[in-house]
Image (tube, helix red, strand yellow):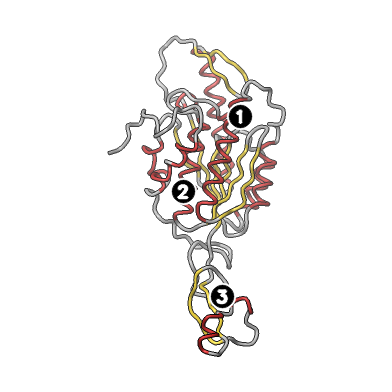
């Protein structure tokens, strides 16, 4: 039975972030099909290779040959047969999956169900669980205004548990400092995109999870380099008030906090504010289109369970 769109996800309150609600995203991840794409790098991929070499998955034992690594000698078989034998392995070619998780102050906004930042974390956790379920290595760059975490790709549950821990840490820090003036936001995404390029190995799958704010020409240059040897796609997390889909009365006075500033919106000021929100999204979508990076919109006003078709 599907969850109604206006129902909070399991263990979630919509504002704070807990490890329990991100662990629960494991169930959502099972609904995402296996993406069997060919990696662009010659020696990178997301499934086991038929090439035999040193790896993790045992293949067979054969007689030791000159030049074989002595560390692969099977001493039990050697002792039993009286002749040196060496182990062969199927070389594992796990594809690295990298997430850029945007948790800047601009995402601590919500008008209906969840803060956009909470939906970002739910989406990142769901994609992360899916990656390790497919046997890929998972890493991330988690971006806050004054706090960042870099996670190098790791296998199995090491990768996802590190992601969950880091997201809850950064999210909590951001919530506690919402009233603090942001001094490091200028150029933050450009710096983060450069860091993402350094972190990403050729042949990786890269997901950008953001609200689209703060991406400038310096970001374009870094993302262009990233797309040359990797598969890159973007998710933009929106809010009903920011995309104009929330039904409002003809007259209203609506207090909001946006980009670190407290505002009171009436009908006139809301229309102008909404136009700025739409222009920011349009600018990000145009940049992604110029880089051939597909963009999908995720609504923070609906349970992610209702939007799984966008993740397939």
Q: In this view, does 181 lie above or below 221?
A: above
- Given the current orientation, which residue lies at the most extreme left position? 1
For residue 53, which quarter of the picture?
Answer: bottom right
Name the mark on residue 24.
none
Q: Name the residue under label 3.
A: 53
Question: Residue sitting at 53 percent across and 44 percent down?
Answer: 234
4 sits to left or right of 235: left
Which comes before the other along the chain, label 3 or label 2? 3
Which comes before the other along the chain, label 2 or label 1? 2
- Say if mark 3 contacts mark 2, CB within 8 Å: no
Kind of element beneath mark 3: strand
Which comes before the other along the chain, label 1 or label 3? 3
Residue 125 coordinates in the image, percent (x, y):
49, 43
Q: Distance between the residues labelled 2 and 1?
A: 24 Å
Question: Residue sitting at 56 percent across and 38 percent down?
Answer: 167
Name the mark on residue 174.
1
The one of 185 and 87 positioned closer to us in this rendering: 87
Q: Name the residue under label 2.
A: 129
């Amino acid at each position: 039975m599907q969850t109604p769109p206006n129902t909070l996800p399991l263990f979630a309150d919509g504002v704070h972030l807990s490890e329990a609600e991100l662990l629960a995203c494991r169930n959502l991840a099972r609904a995402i099909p296996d993406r069997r794409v060919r990696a662009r790098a010659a020696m990178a991929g997301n499934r086991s290779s038929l090439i035999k070499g040193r790896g993790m998955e045992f293949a067979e034992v054969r007689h030791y040959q000159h030049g074989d690594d002595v560390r692969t000698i099977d001493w039990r078989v050697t002792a039993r047969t009286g002749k040196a034998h060496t182990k062969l392995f199927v070389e594992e070619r796990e594809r690295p999956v990298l997430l850029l998780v945007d948790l800047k102050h601009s995402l601590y906004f919500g008008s209906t169900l969840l803060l956009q930042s909470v939906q970002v974390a739910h989406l990142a956790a769901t994609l992360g669980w899916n990656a390790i379920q497919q046997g890929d290595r998972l890493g991330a760059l988690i971006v806050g205004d004054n706090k960042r975490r870099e996670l190098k790709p790791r296998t199995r549950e090491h990768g996802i548990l590190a992601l969950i821990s880091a997201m809850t840490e950064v999210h909590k820090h951001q919530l506690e400092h919402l009233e603090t003036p942001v001094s490091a936001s200028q150029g933050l995404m450009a710096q983060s995109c450069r860091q993402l390029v350094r972190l990403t190995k050729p042949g990786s799958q890269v997901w950008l999870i953001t609200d689209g704010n703060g991406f400038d020409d310096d970001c374009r240059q870094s993302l262009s380099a990233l797309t040359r040897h990797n598969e890159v796609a973007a998710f933009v997390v929106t809010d009903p008030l920011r995309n104009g889909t929330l039904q409002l009365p003809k007259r209203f006075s609506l207090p909001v906090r946006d980009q670190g500033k407290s505002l009171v919106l009436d009908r006139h000021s809301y229309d102008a504010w909404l136009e700025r929100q739409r222009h920011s999204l349009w600018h990000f979508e145009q940049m992604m289109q110029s880089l051939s990076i597909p963009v999908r919109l995720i609504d923070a006003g609906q349970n992610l369970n209702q939007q799984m078709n966008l993740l397939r």
